[in-house]
Every structure is written in structure tokens, then in C-alpha cells.
Image (tube, rainbow, N blue to C red):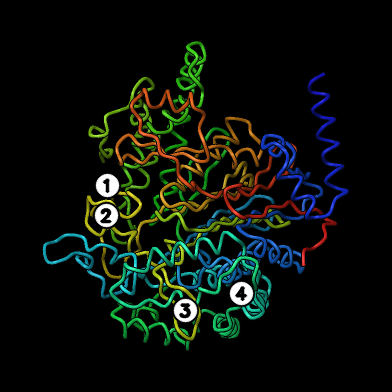
């Protein structure tokens, strides 16, 4: 009877929403309980009706994906158009002056071949290992974060260009036109963007010895007002006409190099001339009945997620037994779960600090780190009853929250998981004058001094030490899940080092906790990364009894204002689902054969 009443309430709720205007629908969604939202917000589309899907970080990138699909474009076409659109409408992370990773699955039939494109920034040729140290060998505060010395050579334009050259079908210039129009005519600024810009402007004000021009370009970001970027529109127009060569060798390159050389930066025209994105072999592991495909070095994310998932698989029987014991003792499930995840993460982040860096410069032991025997040995060290000593967690023998991710699958079953970033919100505070785009501060993702934590508390070693033309380590983890060669899941997240936790826990929620797509991304998340010692951060909230049990175990608990923004596409037994994380301002949708196109 209770189930029947619940189903009746949901049907009545759907009818009410369908009869209302868009604004009224939004008010209804805000008014209903969060659990009911999770239950009814999932749109499941059978394969026969499927016409593509997306989970995007904002409404403007969502619109452009639908437009591309309506023109017959594929997932790469949509990713290129969305990537440039986000450079206009999501300036805190969408970018021309940054870089990222793309995990893809493409093929002419149902069975797809996985690929990975690394368009991470590279250190300029003038970047040496002591770049951010003073005469005493100590780290100079903020030098790797703020101002001209903080930037690597940007990779985004080259990455999107090379992806389009390999897999795109629609004309390059046509894909950039929506972003050009939006930069020229402007877009209505969301409240979250204005608040982020105000925070950044205050934060950066006293952290650079050189004058920054961020406020000159972005002080006009006011919630509800139209924001135009005419210089950026001109830059995009040049790139649309000439391709990536314009950004790296044309007028834009000249503007960038001249401004950096004038202000003590490291990037030269020669650095720009020599930049290339790289196709790499993705990290692949079998996990239960699925195959996980994720990012290889210089990302730490793919290896870390593979390690977490495999150790979970090996320990699941013990984990379920611990949950049963906890239930008998009146201990909440979430406390056991958070402790278990922290025990796994300690071992993963110890390996990250020792072994991971740019594989072009350092022999990263990828195969050894994800090998079953090694991970079984690591898993056997997990303590379900108490916190393992941080000091005794050693590497096995043998990053910024402000990133953005999108997930796309086209009507043909080709998929793109793309994560790119400037690092901190709005990068290093430098806008290229005459070109209108922000530059990254990715140099902080190197180990400025091995053994010393960066801004985000992540410790690195010599494998990730600064060197000329080296790519800095990242946690970005665009990930696919395949089954029998078919794409089943597309996901990723921003969040610096918490990306790894966000992707891992979302996959567990889907495949082992039997949640639907929206529940999986909205569920509370926890994060632990070896150091700070015995600290678990969480978002959005943990129950009081969960906090009490974790505190009794010896954990320090800290609520984060932000812990990822997962964009998820998932093919359940009943069909496709799409979900944008409640933590962001994303939009997700599964398209049907007769779906109306957003304008």
C-alpha cells in the first residue's frame, strides 16, 4: 500500500510539473523533498528512442550540444563546440589559456575503441627545478599560483583542434560560431559566477608583486546582467578561420608572448611554436563485469581510480561483513563506509606522491601500480577496525577545485569525457590584453619542492618536479565504463585531488549501491588523501551519529563548501540516464528521436 501511494504521488507530481511554466517547474522542484527529487528527476530513455545525451556544467554548453546534434554532428563535434562555449560562459574554468584531458570511445559499429588525448599544459623551456624557491631553498609563497611565473604553455586550443582533426565531422569554424556569438552579444551572468569572481578578486589582490589586470576585464560580472567579451570574440573569430595555428603562431600567440616577456613571465613564442597535444594509451582495468577506461599519466586520476576500484572489489566481502557487524552494534553504515574509503585512499595517495608524474620524463610504473597481485597486497593492509598509522603508509615497492568536466554521448554511441581547467578559479589573474582570455596557474601542480604540500595539501615527489617542457601532474580523471565494447558510463568531475574520490564514489554508488544516476551524483561524498593526517572532508553533510562514530575512531572532520561536480551519463538496465551534480549549475538531458532542440 505504501508503494502504491508513493507511485501515485510521483505520477501526480509529474502531471503537475508538466502543466506548469518553466519558472513554476523550477519552484516546484525546489519545494519538494530532496529524496523525492532524486526519485523522479531521472529520465530513462530506451535505446530504440535514444538520440544522444549530455551532462554539462552550464546551460549554454548544454544548448550548443543539442544544436550540434541537430546538425548531424558527433560527440567530438559537440565537445569542441562546448569547450569553446565554456571559455566564454564559464570563465572560472572553461578556457583558451589552460589545458586538460579527454577520454574517448569511437568506432563505426556498436563496439568502440577507447583513446585518450593529453592536452595538459607544459612547463616553458625556462622553467627550472628551483624556479619557486628563494635563496635559502624555501618555497616563495604564491609565486607558482599568482602572476606571470605561474603559467604553463596552454594546451586547450591544440587539444580541441587535434580531436576535431581525428574524429570531427562538422566544419571547425561552424563549431566555434556559437561561442563567437555568445562572446560578442553577451550572456546573462549567473549568481554563482558573480560570487566566485568577487571572491577571487579579493583573494588575489595582495598576492602578486606584479600588477594584475583581472578586475579590468571581469569586474563587470554582475548577476542577472549581460556580460560581453568583444576581445575574446575577435580571438575566437581568428581561431575559427585559421585553426590552432593562429593561437600558437598567429596574432594571439604574439600578444601572449609579448605580454609575458614584458612582465617577467616564462612563456616565449618558441614555447608556443613547439606545443603539441599527445595521444596516449588510456589506463584500462577489468572491474567486476565492466572495463574501466581512464586517464594515464600525467594524470594521477586514472591509476588512482583503478586502484581504489580494484581494492574495493577484493575487499567487498570483508566490507559487507563489517557493515553487518556495524548494524548489529547500532553503528551507522556511512561511518563504516567513510572509514573504508579513507583506508583505501591512504594507500592510493602514498603511491601518487612517490610514483606519479609526466611519463615522458619519469618511468611511471603504470602496469605494476594496477596489477592484481600488487593491489591485493595493498588491500590486505586495510584495517576495518581502526585507522592505519599514517606514518606507516608508504608507497608500494617496485589538484584545484576549479576545473570543469562534461560528458557527451552521440546518437551513434561515440562518447567523450572531457575535463579541462585553469587550475584555481580564473587562473593566475592575468588576462591577455587584446585577446581577452585568462591564463592558467598550473605550475603549482608541480612539486615546487619535493615533500612539501601545494595549495591543495597534496604532497609530491621528484617524479613531479619542475622541468622544462614537462607536463605537471593532475588529478583530472575523465572516465568511461565499457561492457562488451559498448559504452555504458561516461563521467568525470572538477575538484582537484577530490576528483578521484568523486569519480570513485559515484561508480560505487551506481554499480554496488544500486542508486540511479541522479542519486549517485547527489549522494554525500567524503575525501581523504593521506595528509593532512586522519582528516576526512565531506559534502554536503553527514548525520550526527556518523560524525560521532568517525570522531571516536580518531578522525578529524571538516565540511568542504565544495566536493566535486560530477557530470554523469549511465546506461542502466532500463535505458540511458543523465545527471548533473546538485553541487554545480550543470544541465543534463537524454535526447529522444523527436526531442525539440533548445535555442
Q: Secondary structure at mark 1?
A: helix
> To which residue does mark 2 refer?
463
Camera-side mark, 3 or 1:
3
Q: Are marks 3 and 2 in contact (CB under 8 Å)?
A: no
Residue at the spot x=86%, y=36% of the render? 12
Q: Disc number at residue 274?
A: none
Rounded to the nearest angstrom, the CA distance separating label 3 from label 1 is: 42 Å
> Which residue corresponds to mark 4?
227
Query: Relative to 513, does residue 111 appear above or below in the rendering?
Result: below
Q: Which residue is mark 3?
A: 216
CA–CA distance in space, label 4 to label 1: 45 Å
First in sequence, mark 3 or 1: give its number: 3
From the image, state whether disc 3 or disc 2 is nearer to you.
3
Kindly report which numbered mark, 2 or 4, lies closer to the viewer in this rendering.
4
Q: CA distance from mark 2 to mark 4?
A: 42 Å
Q: Which numbered disc flags the more N-terminal residue, 4 or 3?
A: 3
Amino acid at each position: 500500500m505504501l508503494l502504491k501511494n508513493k507511485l501515485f504521488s510521483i505520477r501526480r507530481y509529474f502531471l503537475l510539473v508538466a502543466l506548469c511554466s518553466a519558472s513554476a517547474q523550477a519552484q516546484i522542484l525546489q519545494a519538494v523533498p530532496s529524496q523525492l527529487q532524486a526519485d523522479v528527476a531521472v529520465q530513462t530513455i530506451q535505446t530504440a528512442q535514444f538520440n544522444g545525451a549530455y551532462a554539462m556544467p552550464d546551460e549554454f554548453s548544454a544548448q550548443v550540444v543539442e544544436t550540434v546534434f541537430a546538425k548531424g554532428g558527433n560527440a567530438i563535434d559537440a565537445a569542441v563546440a562546448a569547450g569553446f562555449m565554456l571559455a566564454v560562459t564559464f570563465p572560472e574554468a572553461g578556457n583558451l589559456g589552460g589545458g586538460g584531458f579527454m577520454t574517448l570511445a569511437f568506432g563505426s559499429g556498436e563496439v568502440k575503441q577507447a583513446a585518450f588525448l593529453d592536452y595538459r599544459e607544459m612547463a616553458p623551456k625556462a622553467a627550472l627545478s628551483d624556479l619557486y624557491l628563494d635563496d635559502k631553498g624555501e618555497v616563495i609563497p604564491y609565486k607558482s599560483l599568482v602572476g606571470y611565473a605561474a603559467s604553463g604553455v596552454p594546451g586547450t586550443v591544440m587539444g580541441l583542434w587535434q580531436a576535431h582533426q581525428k574524429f570531427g565531422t562538422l566544419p571547425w569554424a561552424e563549431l566555434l560560431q556559437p561561442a563567437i556569438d555568445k562572446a560578442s552579444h553577451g550572456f546573462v551572468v549567473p549568481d554563482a559566477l558573480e560570487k566566485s569572481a568577487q571572491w577571487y578578486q579579493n583573494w588575489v589582490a595582495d598576492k602578486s608583486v606584479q600588477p594584475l589586470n583581472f578586475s579590468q576585464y571581469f569586474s563587470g560580472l554582475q548577476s542577472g546582467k549581460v556580460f560581453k567579451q568583444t576581445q575574446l570574440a575577435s580571438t575566437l573569430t581568428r581561431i575559427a578561420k585559421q585553426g590552432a595555428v593562429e593561437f600558437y603562431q598567429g596574432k594571439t600567440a604574439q600578444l601572449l608572448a609579448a605580454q609575458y616577456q614584458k612582465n617577467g613571465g616564462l612563456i616565449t613564442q618558441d614555447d608556443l611554436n613547439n606545443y603539441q597535444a599527445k595521444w596516449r594509451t588510456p589506463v584500462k582495468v577489468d572491474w567486476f563485469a565492466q572495463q574501466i577506461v581512464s586517464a594515464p599519466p600525467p594524470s594521477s586520476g586514472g591509476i588512482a581510480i583503478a586502484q581504489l576500484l580494484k581494492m574495493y572489489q577484493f575487499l567487498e566481502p570483508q566490507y559487507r561483513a563489517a557493515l553487518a557487524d556495524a548494524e548489529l552494534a547500532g553503528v551507522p553504515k556511512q561511518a563504516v563506509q567513510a572509514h573504508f574509503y579513507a583506508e583505501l585512499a591512504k594507500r592510493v595517495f602514498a603511491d601518487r606522491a612517490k610514483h606519479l608524474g609526466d611519463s615522458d620524463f619519469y618511468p611511471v610504473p603504470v602496469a605494476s601500480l594496477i596489477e592484481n597481485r600488487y593491489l591485493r597486497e595493498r588491500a590486505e593492509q586495510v584495517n576495518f577496525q581502526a585507522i592505519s598509522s599514517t606514518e606507516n603508509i608508504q608507497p608500494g615497492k617496485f589538484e584545484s577545485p576549479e576545473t570543469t568536466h562534461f560528458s557527451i554521448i552521440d546518437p551513434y554511441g561515440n562518447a567523450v569525457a572531457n575535463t579541462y581547467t585553469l587550475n584555481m578559479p580564473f587562473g593566475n589573474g592575468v588576462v591577455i590584453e587584446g585577446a581577452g582570455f585568462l591564463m592558467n596557474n598550473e605550475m603549482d601542480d608541480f612539486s615546487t619542492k619535493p615533500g612539501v604540500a601545494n595549495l591543495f595539501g597534496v604532497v609530491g615527489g621528484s617524479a613531479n618536479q619542475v622541468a622544462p617542457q614537462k607536463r605537471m601532474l593532475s588529478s583530472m580523471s575523465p572516465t568511461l565504463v565499457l561492457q562488451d565494447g559498448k559504452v555504458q558510463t561516461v563521467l568525470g568531475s572538477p575538484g582537484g585531488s577530490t576528483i578521484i574520490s568523486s569519480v570513485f564514489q559515484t561508480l560505487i554508488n551506481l554499480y554496488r549501491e544500486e542508486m540511479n544516476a541522479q542519486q549517485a551524483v547527489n549522494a554525500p561524498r567524503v575525501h581523504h588523501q593521506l595528509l593532512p593526517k586522519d582528516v576526512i572532508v565531506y559534502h554536503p553533510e553527514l548525520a550526527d551519529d556518523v560524525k560521532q562514530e568517525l570522531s571516536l575512531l580518531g578522525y578529524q572532520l571538516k565540511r568542504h563548501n565544495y566536493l566535486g561536480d560530477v557530470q554523469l551519463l549511465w546506461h542502466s538496465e532500463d535505458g540511458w540516464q543523465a545527471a548533473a551534480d546538485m553541487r554545480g549549475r550543470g544541465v543534463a538531458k537524454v535526447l529522444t528521436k523527436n526531442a525539440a532542440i533548445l535555442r
